[in-house]
Image (cartoon, grey):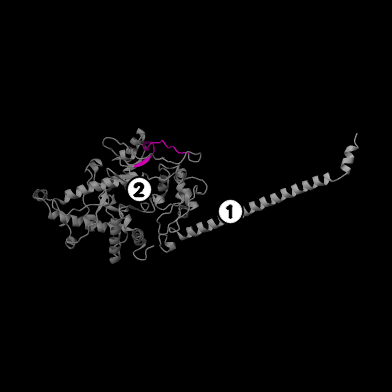
């Protein structure tokens, strides 16, 4: 919880503290920051990472073109989600300095940009951001310092992020104006283009500021998409009726029809698993992505990797119903069980050069603990905000599991156990040590009992043999025995 500026200030500081806990060797890692309450993942990490690279590449090309020749080499590295309306006032930097959307001016047909629901996204959305750890850490540090310096100016994360993005875009416009070619100057004069540098009296104090953080937006909603506006629906791409119905539900008229995106189709199948086929791991492993329902933009055919539900604006009952429509239902419990039993492999990979491949592993492989009870970098404020690693079952109680699995199944039991790392959580180390001592004590007692039983059995066998030998010896020395024998017949 935040000690100033409200809860969201505390969240911001917590995120920064988490990133500051990583060493320099992790600077090139990609960080994905999302709202912890209502963001769902529907595509694989491979798709998410590949799209991040493509968006950055396209954004850098636009930036170089916009700034003109001779301008400083400014690049983009952090991608934020985009939204259609500005959350701040029209006089705020985050609103009037936001550049025009690069999407086609007819992407929603003839009504594009005529109303909020049909507008092209162009404003920053704070609920999702992705970028390299070192750049993300510096950006969050700047956001914390800015909020701390003016706590009365910002009410939430959206406000402070929008202000930083506005400052950056204003500064980029200053650079662009200084490096315009004669043709660009003539075009600007002829079409009477109005620059944001002239449209607001507050701009003058921003002209010499240096506030470049490599921010760009996910205009198409490739990484993530908010569900506030009725332009998307659940689509089963293999079913033509489903495609038509989705377009009809949102009054869409997609050009060229809708087809599942190639990067989704080429990724690992949704129910892929290396876990051995067993009775309790019954999954449709060969099912293709086009045969499952995906939340997609019915105008553009873009299927976001993440779905962001703004629960403050949406119906909570509908929100719960939509959770059950995600493709991994009703296989969620089985998928988690399969993940726990499967051998380790990268969740994504990319070629850095013809001879160099970079593999991305989940947290399990970098901290080898029980995969079904994997720890998350969660800052538990009840533990003093230490960011201690927490077990999955500690985060997701039995009550919450019913909602997560969307079934009436029993409490989750870990199908595989791995010893925890002592450095990750002291309590886990104590538990592991105690369990090891108990198992050793039980083994010692069992060994003693087996030795005692073997000794007793040996003594009994020896006693029985001695008794038998004594009886035989006694029989040999008895004279009446021969008398009895000789007296017969």
Q: Quadrant of the N terminus?
A: bottom left
Calculate the distance from the C-alpha at mark 1 to the C-alpha at mark 2: 41 Å
Q: Report the front residue among 392 and 328.
A: 392
Task: Name the element at disc 1.
Answer: helix
Task: Name the element at disc 2.
Answer: strand
Task: Identify the residue shown where x is 26% and y is 35%.
Answer: 256
Q: Report the front residue among 244 and 238.
A: 238
Tell me where residue 278 appears, x and y as whole percent: 49, 39
Tell whether 204 sits left or right of 25. left
Indicate which disc residue 235 carries: none
Please indicate, yes or no, whether residue 119 appears anywhere in the rendered image: no
Q: Quadrant of the C terminus?
A: top right
Tell me where residue 166 appears, x and y as whole percent: 23, 57
Residue under circle 1? 443
Residue under circle 2? 360
Q: Is residue 288 magenta?
A: yes
Q: Is residue 382 magenta?
A: no
Task: Identify the residue shown where x is 44% and y is 62%.
Answer: 383
Main SS, magenta region, reads loop
Q: Report the front residue among 254 and 431.
A: 431
Q: How many residues crowd around disc 1 within 10 Å: few (fewer than 14), some, or many (20 or more)?
A: few
Tell whether 123 sits left or right of 284. left
Count of residue discs: 2
Tell me where residue 322 appears, x and y as whole percent: 40, 45
Q: Report the front residue among 342 and 466.
A: 466
Tell whether 120 sits left or right of 9. left
Q: How many residues crowd around disc 2 within 10 Å: few (fewer than 14), some, or many (20 or more)?
A: some
Please indicate, yes or no, whether residue 441 appears anywhere in the rendered image: yes
Q: Quadrant of residue 485?
A: top right
> In this picture, which residue range is highlighted in magenta?
282-295
């Amino acid at each position: 919880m935040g000690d100033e500026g409200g809860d969201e200030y505390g969240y911001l500081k917590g995120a920064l503290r988490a990133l500051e806990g990583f060493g320099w060797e992790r600077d090139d890692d990609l960080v994905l920051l999302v709202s912890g309450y209502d963001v769902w993942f529907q595509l694989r990490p491979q798709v998410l990472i590949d799209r991040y690279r493509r968006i950055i590449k396209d954004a850098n090309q636009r930036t170089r073109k916009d700034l003109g020749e001779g301008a400083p080499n400014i690049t983009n590295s952090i991608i934020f989600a985009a939204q259609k309306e500005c959350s701040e006032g029209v006089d705020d930097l985050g609103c009037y300095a936001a550049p025009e959307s690069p999407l086609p001016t007819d992407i929603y047909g003839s009504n594009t940009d005529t109303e909020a629901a049909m507008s092209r996204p162009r404003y920053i959305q704070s609920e999702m951001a992705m970028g390299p750890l070192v750049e993300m850490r510096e950006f969050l540090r700047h956001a914390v310092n800015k909020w701390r310096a003016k706590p009365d100016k910002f009410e939430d994360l959206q406000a402070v992020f929008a202000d930083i993005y506005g400052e950056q875009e204003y500064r980029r416009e200053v650079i662009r104006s200084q490096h315009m070619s004669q043709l660009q100057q003539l075009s600007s004069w002829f079409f009477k283009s109005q620059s944001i540098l002239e449209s607001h009296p507050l701009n003058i104090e921003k002209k010499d500021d240096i506030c470049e953080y490599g921010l760009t937006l996910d205009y198409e909603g490739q990484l993530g998409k908010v569900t506030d506006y009725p332009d998307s629906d659940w689509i089963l791409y293999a079913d033509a009726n489903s495609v038509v119905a989705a377009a009809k539900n949102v009054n869409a008229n997609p050009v060229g029809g809708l087809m599942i995106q190639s990067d989704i189709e080429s990724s690992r199948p949704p129910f892929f698993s290396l876990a051995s086929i067993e009775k309790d791991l019954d999954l449709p492993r060969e099912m293709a992505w086009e045969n499952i329902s995906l939340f997609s933009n019915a105008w553009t055919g873009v299927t976001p990797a993440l779905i962001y539900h703004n629960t403050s604006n949406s119906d909570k009952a509908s929100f719960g119903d939509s959770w059950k429509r995600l493709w991994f239902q009703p296989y969620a419990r089985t998928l988690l069980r399969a993940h726990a039993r499967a051998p380790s492999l990268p969740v994504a990979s990319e070629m850095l050069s013809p001879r160099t491949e970079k593999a991305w592993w989940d947290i399990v492989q970098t901290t080898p603990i029980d995969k079904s009870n994997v720890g998350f970098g969660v800052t538990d404020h009840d533990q003093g905000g230490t960011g201690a690693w927490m077990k999955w079952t500690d985060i997701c109680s039995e009550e919450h599991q019913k909602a997560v699995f969307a079934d009436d199944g029993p409490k989750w039991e870990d199908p595989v156990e791995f010893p925890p790392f002592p450095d990750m959580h002291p309590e886990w180390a104590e538990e592991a040590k105690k369990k090891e001592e108990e198992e050793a004590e039980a083994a010692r007692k069992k060994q003693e009992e087996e030795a005692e039983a073997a000794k007793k059995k040996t003594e009994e066998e020896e006693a029985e043999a001695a008794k038998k030998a004594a009886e035989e010896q006694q029989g040999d020395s008895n004279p009446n025995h021969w008398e009895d024998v000789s007296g017969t017949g």
